[in-house]
Structures are given as structure tokens and as C-alpha cells.
Image (cartoon, helix red, strand yellow):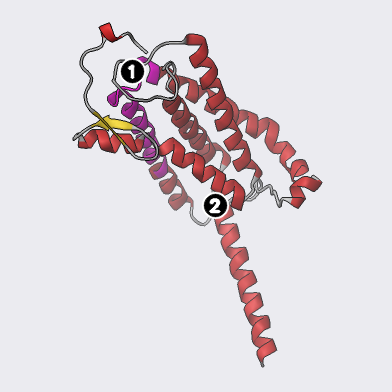
Amino acid sequence: MASEEQCSAPPRWRSISLTHVEYPAGDLTGQVLAYMSLLPIAILVGFITLIVFKRELHTISFFGGLIMNEGLNWLLKHILQEPRPCGGHSSVTTEYGMPSSHSQFIWFFVVYFFLFLYLRMHQTNNARCVELLWRHILSIMLLAVALSVSYSRVYLLYHTWSQVIYGGVAGLVMGVVWFFITQEVLTPLFPKIAAWPISEFFLVRDTSLIPNILWFEYTVTRSEARNRQRKLGTKLQ
């Protein structure tokens, strides 16, 4: 941390319970941004939930990229050892701030998701305009989220602008690199991985060749439910 002689009198900070993300007491904007800075945690929880219940290889690969991105951030912080700005926070996870882990995380996630939406997902013939529209809307929302999370780290005095910007650049580069590794190297291996005995035991699956997994699951579930309903009706007669 920076020396006390260089710091002005810090504001009085109030902590969000459980996570200990602090914001200036009485500052509504700071409180909103403090909650925004928790989005990376929510994303991680979402990934773990998806992996447990869906067990899809691409989701596992995406999550693995996020973990490696965090590992790179830890390594860069301990190599550069640049202190955080003076903020008077009672507790931080590490004393180093370059690059911002929140910024690097969220920009990895958003850039990877952009590439997934526009390069990986296939267009459906019966809803092309609708598909493109919701992708554009989702992209705008993701961009707003990334900017909000990044700005929150500066506003709450956890990082300087340079730490946030360099973190964003690192996350962007890692997101692009990992997407193309997944697309060009790992995806061709997914069918073989899904056929491994351990993968079959844990019901790990590969849905890479299914254009619209949501529509596929909906139609298959509806068809199976109708078949079972007909069989049940026949037995009751």
C-alpha cells in the first residue's frame, strides 16, 4: 500500500456484509457500484452451477480460461508489485493493484462472450432477425456491465485508472487467445473427451454441433413429455 504520508484523510467506508466490498458511507452511487463490483463473483457462481447441472465441455473450457486468467493476474501483480491507491480500506485481498483483477476478469468474460455470440453460434433460418437483435442487445448489456465494473474499482479507490485499463487489456487479450484455443484446438477434441469412460460416468457432454441448444432441449423435452403422456394414457385405459 502507498505510504501514509502520501495519503489525504480517507473517507469513512462502509462494508457490504459477507463480501466486505467497501463504499463511502452515505454514497448511493458508491453503494450501487460496490454491488456492481460483485458481478465477477456472481459469474463464477453461475459457471459452477452450469457445470454441475449441464456438464457441457465448452462451458467447462470457458470456466477453465477464467481460472487461468485469474492465475495470470496473480502472477502479474506479484511481478509488478504496484501498490493500490490511498483509500483507507480496512481490508483488501492483496496489497498490489496492477493490474486490476476485477477489470481483467470482466473483460475476459465479455470479450469471450462477444466472440462466442458472433463467431461460434450458428444462425437459425427461421428467426434470423430475432437472433441478431437479441445478440446485439445482449452485447450492449455486457459492454455496459464491463464498463461499470471497471469504473467501480476506480470510484471505490481500489485501483487507479492505469491499473484498471491494463487489467482490461490483459483480459481482452486473454479472452481472444483462449477463445481461439478453445475453437481451433479443444473443440475438435470434445467428441473424444465426451466418449471417455470417466466423462460418460459423470454425464459430461459435447453440444458443439447443435446450433441452438436451448431450442434443441425444448423440442426434445416436449416430444419426450408427449410420448410419455400418451403411454400413460394408454395404460390407464
* Magenta stretch contains residue 163: yes
The front one of 87 and 131 is 87
Q: Earlier in the sequence, mark 2 or mark 1?
A: 2
Count of marks placed on residues: 2
Q: Position of residue 122 (x, y in %)?
A: 57, 45
- Tell me if 85 is positioned left or right of 54 in this view: left
Residue 81 magenta-highlighted = no
Percent of width and height locating residue 189: 74, 37
Q: Is residue 65 above or below residue 78?
A: below
Residue that label 1 marks = 161
* Residue 195 seen by the camera: no
Relative to 155, say whether 2 is above or below: above
Residue nearest the viewer, comparing 149 with 84:
84
Residue name at image x 64 percent, y 86 percent:
233
Task: Inspect this view and state whether residue 224 appears.
Answer: yes
Looking at the rendering, in which quadrant would you find the C terminus?
bottom right
Residue at the disc numbered 2: 124
Element type at marker 2? loop
The crowding category of the residue bearing disc 2, from other C-alpha atoms within 10 Å (few below 14, some 14 to 19, many at least 20), is few
